[in-house]
Amino acid sequence: MKPEEASRLAPHVDRLFWAMCGLSGAIMLLVGALVLFFTIKYRRGTAAPRGPVPDKLSQEVEIGWTAATAFAFVFLFWFAAVAQTSEFEVPAKAMEIHVVAKQWMWKLEHPDGMREIDALHVPVNVPVRLVMTSQDVIHSFYVPAFRLKRDVLPGRYVEAAFTATKPGTYHLFCAEYCGTDHSRMIGGIVVMTQADYARWSAARPQGDSLADQGRVLFERMGCTGCHGPTAQVHAPDLAGIYGTRQPLEGGGFALADESYLRDSIMLPRKDMVAGYPPIMPSYQGVASEDDIVRLVAYLKTLQPPNDRTPAKP
Ligand code: CUA
């Protein structure tokens, strides 16, 4: 039985699924019918013509079925691509949830610092953007009712998005075998009406937002020593860096998105910004994935100074 349709993407995926079933079924019937027809027509002892097929006919049939097959595949590609890509256009105002997977639990963090384990509360009809990473091995974030499945990889950020369309509680599974308790790495996505969500969120203990916690870390880890406004060292100014295009040492550009900021902290030699000496130390093993989530959240809030126009992405 197919799971409930509870996201904006779900009906598109289901339509695609049934269209594929229908098309495959029709082709199977056609091939089966032809096999049966020819078996009877050309059975031993019948007077059916057995010479070669006329050239003209064989050519037309060849071109005809090749074209039909090509058309069917192009149509299916277009059909599937439209359904999938619609979900990749995430509105800038989408609610951002950070997901850190580990053996064997899901840690989810709201931008205001609210944390959940194996559960995620979201309001209905609000686009949600997931920025996911793993602390250890490959996991996979799978919510059948949303027709959403994305592998969550260690060492990088993976994005996914959904818009829930129906209040309720939906299963969250890990869909990538990740060790002993893989089958118990499950949880629930609770979709609430906007009013319920506001009430739920107000009733939660209020902590510092991710960005505030990131600012504390930024100072505690000594980042201000080089990246602060009064630093003596020649290090890139981080104010307003998020979303800009950074010129790289050796040519080319990199978009300063979450993945880029993460890599710059963990693997500072990967994409060096042009014109700066390679003096940034790697924070691999020093900063945890949770720390990085906070640092990146903080960096995203830094505004460029007023006297400078921000570089357009
Ligand atoms: Cu995590 Cu399977």
Image (cartoon, grey):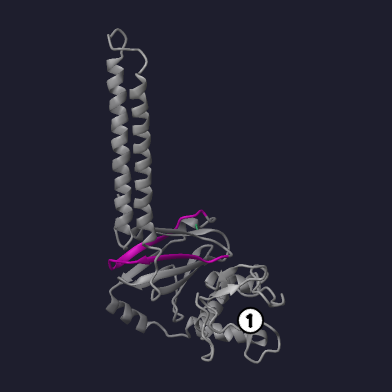
Position above or below: 34 against 51: below
Residue drawn at x 28%, y 68% is 167
Badge count: 1
Q: Position of residue 44 (x, y in %)?
A: 32, 9
Amino acid carrying mark 1 in the image: Pro
Residue in the picture at 40% in, 66% down: 161
Position of 128 with respect to 233 (left or right) is left
Question: 85 and 267: which one is in front?
Answer: 85
Q: Secondary structure at mark 1?
A: loop
- Residue 180 against residue 309 in the figure, above or below: above
Q: Is residue 250 something one can see in this rendering?
A: yes
The single residue placed furthest to the top in the displayed view is 45
Q: Is residue 2 visible?
A: no
Image coordinates of residue 131 in percent, x first then y, are: 48, 69
- From this viewpoint, which residue is outermost toward the front? 56
Q: Which residue is mark 1?
A: 236
**Front position in the image: 222 or 78:** 78
Image quadrant in which you'd find residue 13: bottom left
Q: Any magenta on residue 90?
A: no
Q: Is residue 160 magenta?
A: yes
Q: Nearer the viewer, residue 163 or 178?
A: 163
- Tell me which segment is drawn in magenta: 156-177
- The vertical placement of 164 against 73, above or below, is below
Q: Check disc 1: other Cα within 10 Å, few if <14, some if 14-19, many if 20+.
A: some
Residue 126 falls in which quadrant of the image? bottom left
Percent x, y of residue 312: 50, 77
The location of residue 152, given as percent across then percent down, is 51, 61
Left or right of 150 in this view: 226? right
Residue under the point 34% across and 63% down: 170
Q: Is mark 1 within 8 Å of ligand 1?
A: no
